[in-house]
Amino acid sequence: MMHAPSLASSSSSFPPSSSLSQFQSQSQSPSASRHGLPRFCYAIKRSKIEPLGIPNRPKSPPSKTKVPCDTDVGNTHCDLNHLRAQLALQNHHTPIIAYTRYLDALVRKSDPSVFSFFNRITQTEGIFPDHYTYGIMIKYCVQMNQLNLAFSFLGWLLKEGERANSKTFSPILQALCSENRIDEAASIVIHKMPKMECIPNVISYTILMKGLCSKGNTGLVLQLFFKMVKHGGVCEPSVITYNTVIDELCKVGELTKAFGLYNQMSTAGIIPDTITYTSLINGLCNKGEITKANKVLRSMRSKGLRPNIVTYNILIGGLCKNGEIGKAKKELDSMISKGLKPDVVTYNTLIDELCKKCEIDKAKELLHSMISKGLKPDVLTYSSLIDGFCKKGEIEKAKELLHDMISKGKEPDVVTYTSLIYGLCKKGETETAKEMLHDMISKGHEPDVVTYSTLIDGLFKKDEIEKAKELLHSMISKGKEPNVVTYTSLIDGMCKKGEIEKAMEILHDMISKGKEPDVVTYNTIIDGLCKKCEIEKAKELLHSMVSKGLEPDVVTYSTLIDGLCKKGEIEKAKEMLHDMISKGKEPNVVTYNTLINGLCKKSEIEKAKELLHSMISKGPKPNVVTYSTLIDGLCKKGEIEKAKELLHDMISRGKEPNVVTYTSLIDGMCKKGEIEKAKKMLHDMISKGHVPNSVTYATLYRWGLCKKGEKITSNSQFIHFSQQKKRRNVHMKVTQIVRLHSKFVKIVVDIMLFV
């Protein structure tokens, strides 16, 4: 009995060829040709890959005699008698060519009778396959996910003395790469093929490169590429090879190398195509370099290449990630004007970004536009909108959309449910959130660690500590290992309760279990320590995170600066600010506001003003909180005129004063005995639509500007006072505020007293 030769003998790392002995041992047929192929054919039959059966003859034979081709393959069976007759008429001396062409046509149509046909031409016709026939069978085996059988055919090809070429290996290499068996594919290309005197060609190398790219092995990809360049000939890189490498380099952020290869293409006489430019645009967009991406787009157009839907989707995605939603919508209009139809991906990208910005109405407009163009929203579309509604606190609308989604046959996924659970937790509806969790489980959707972490965080924030712990244990029992987010939620819950020691225990526990804390985790504990005025411990934790290779961010420094300011250690806070800047961390408006507030509380107004001027000249731009803090500091110091000057400066820079700003000025004027000016300021405040809060009323009551027991008795009284277009809404809001805060300040205001 003859066995197919195994290729594994030449190297242990080669993919094991499935020896035909397993098939041959099953065969009971004694018939055998000198090549042993009939035994192999019986083996195929016995392996139940394709039942052996005599095909039916076609009812009406073709009118003209010809060698069968693609168009002759219309049914699952092959009429061998008819084919034999055709070949006899043509006096065809090399029937294997005709049979192979017919076999190839069957394979290309994925016809299930391929193995039957191969059995018959080798067993009944006594024809011996050549390397083309074997190559076709290898391709078919790969198509049928029978990779081991493909190796068997390769083994028989070599045993029969035929030479395999790079085209023979291509399907096997593709199959290995698709199964993530990249090392085996690499062994074939780099070692086995050359040993068999089969020189890998550009296709072999490109297939392997794509496989290596999927594993992120950029270094080896570049080595192979330069090896191809060096050898030249059949190995010389094609535009597809260049595109494969450039795309991988762009994905891993190696843009300098990617552009280097792009420039090398022209030297090698290879013209970049749309895919080349699209890959470069993608790399630039991922880095947030939109201006450069647009420059590449213009270069692409100047060379007569038109961006395709993928190019536009990448550019729109890059603009959205950069927060430039307006420009992204312009690109949408541009692609439509150029005759390109946006797809679901295009709309989903824009809808998702609008939802993240809580611009739900605009997102819904895009949804309607999408539907009107015949595109059907998918799960991602609905999930983005549901997430947007949840972030905006509009849970009922999110639920309505969920029902609409289900009614249209779109099954919510884990992301959809997690968004709803987040929205419910944000509103404090943790019981409903738990019901949602049970509902998703009952419908066959397994919650992931993010789902559990979201609900655990919500329970902690609602001070339902025991329920959070129960859910954590349930999560672990179901094989869901807590991640950094879960632990950070637990730590945050403990810090909010003021139980810093327990928070530190959780931190040590997560580290002992191999979960490395991130910057957010450390920031959470540092914030908890600062709130307890344990600044030294917070600084120790800062040094600990740095020693672990984590870089403190703006939040870390701002938290520590706030803690030092609250403790009255302004000089140390300023030192921390300088240390932050020296390490390349730009303070944001919150950082400056914290320090300005600390300086104002220490009555160091001039130093606070210096910081304000620094912000105006160098950035970040001051906001309403910055101005209000400084105005309050000036008022407390009795410098009302300077406070009013700052108010005018604030308005001139486009910053609208809020209720806090006005209340500080009213309180300062009253302290100086400027009661009439205080009344006028109150009048200005209400006339601009700012509703007094409890602090405002407490200030007015303290200075005798309002009486106990009096209330707004009629709408006309308030209209007379406000004389504004939106007076009814303001009146309603003021009445609500008065009723709400009367419990605390024990007053009900008669607005008419302020005139």
Image (cartoon, helix red, strand yellow):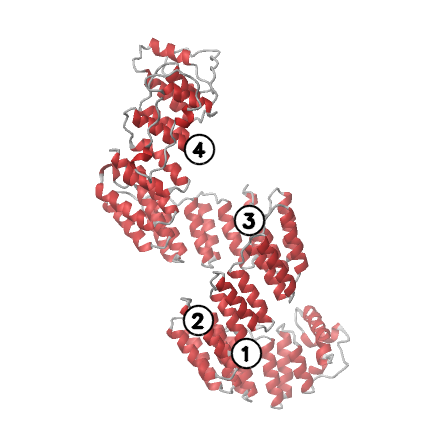
Quickly name the residue at label 3: 381
Quickly name the residue at label 4: 145
In space, the residues marked 2 and 1 are separated at their CA atoms by 36 Å
Q: Nearer the viewer, residue 491 or 345?
A: 491
Q: Nearer the viewer, residue 528 or 249?
A: 528
In space, the residues marked 4 and 2 are separated at their CA atoms by 53 Å
| Helix, strand or loop for disc 3 | helix
Mark before the other along the chain sequence, 4 or 2? 4
Instruction: Give amino acid for label 1.
Output: Ser
Q: Residue furthest bottom?
A: 673
Question: Which x, y percent locates residue 87?
Answer: 35, 12
Closer to the observer: label 1 or label 3?
Answer: 3
What's the mark number on residue 628? Answer: 1
Q: Nearer the viewer, residue 204 or 582?
A: 204
Query: Could you tell me if residue 544 is visible in this image?
Result: yes
Is there CB contact under 8 Å for labels 4 and 3? Answer: no
| Helix, strand or loop for disc 4 | loop
Instruction: Give amino acid for label 4.
Output: Asn
